[in-house]
Amino acid sequence: MNWTPLLLWQLIITIAMSTNKQNQQFPGPRSCSDDEYMDVGLCCKKCPAGYYVEEPCRRPHTQGKCVPCDQGTFTAFSNGLNSCLLCDTCHDDQEMVGECSQTRNRKCQCKAGYFYQYPESSESCMPCDKCPEGIPVLWECNATSNIACGVADPKNSNRLYWIGYIMISICVILFICGLLCKRLNLIRSRGRPVAGNANESENTESQSLTAVSLGVAASCKLL
């Protein structure tokens, strides 16, 4: 009779029973309390904030060897970590508002003139916007929010409109006056006419001056 299959079957049963017994002796992660962590089937007590686990516990519900965090590292809560966390580094567009310690990470915020585009991430800073001229500022830009602009005042808009209208009108008047003066200088540069046409020349100059006056007066009415 071949005993080999029977022996193999007994060996498999023995291994299964041994594994089940270990699981009963060392409960799984769900059976560990909130102040414990699971390591190799054992529930070990966590190390306090500012420490990490150098060696886990050898017996259930006991604490292993806890070691303080080195400079530049931290743990903010009780833990079962095998190393501390590295402290953050502030970027060029950030400034430090809280130094790193064994129990606290370094705290950074955007410099003046910058804000976090996504405050929940606190990663990248964006330059602050500016409100257009004549638009009121509801609140200034800060590290966590951009500037907020209101609505333009209708009175200011009308004032700007009339200022622009007056400036354009003045330019038109000066342009017309320049043309008329150029015309008068051209007439005078031809010299006085013969004696028989003296009265005619005087009348022509008088009419030109009258035209200048009428042109200026008409332009002024535009205002």
Image (tube, grey):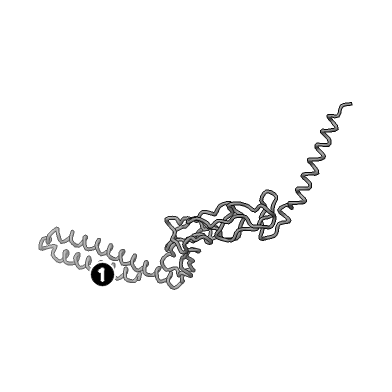
Q: Residue furthest left?
A: 195
User: Which part of the image, by quadrant, shows the C terminus?
Assistant: bottom left
Where is residue 166, by image quadrant?
A: bottom left
Front residue of 142/151: it is 142
Residue 128 in view: no
Q: Residue at x 61, y 57 (%)?
A: 79
Amino acid on which the number 1 mark rests in the picture: Ser
Q: Position of residue 7 (x, y in %)?
A: 83, 33
Q: Position of residue 142 (x, y in %)?
A: 47, 65
Front residue of 60/220: it is 60
Q: Which residue is mark 1?
A: 213
Residue 115 higher or lower than 213, as above or below: above
User: Which part of the image, by quadrant, shows the N terminus?
Assistant: top right
Mark 1 packing: few (<14 Cα in 10 Å), some, or many (20+)?
A: some
Numbered circles on residues, count:
1
Q: Is residue 82 left or right of residue 87?
A: right
Q: Residue furthest top?
A: 1
Mark 1: which secondary structure? helix
Front residue of 155/115: it is 115
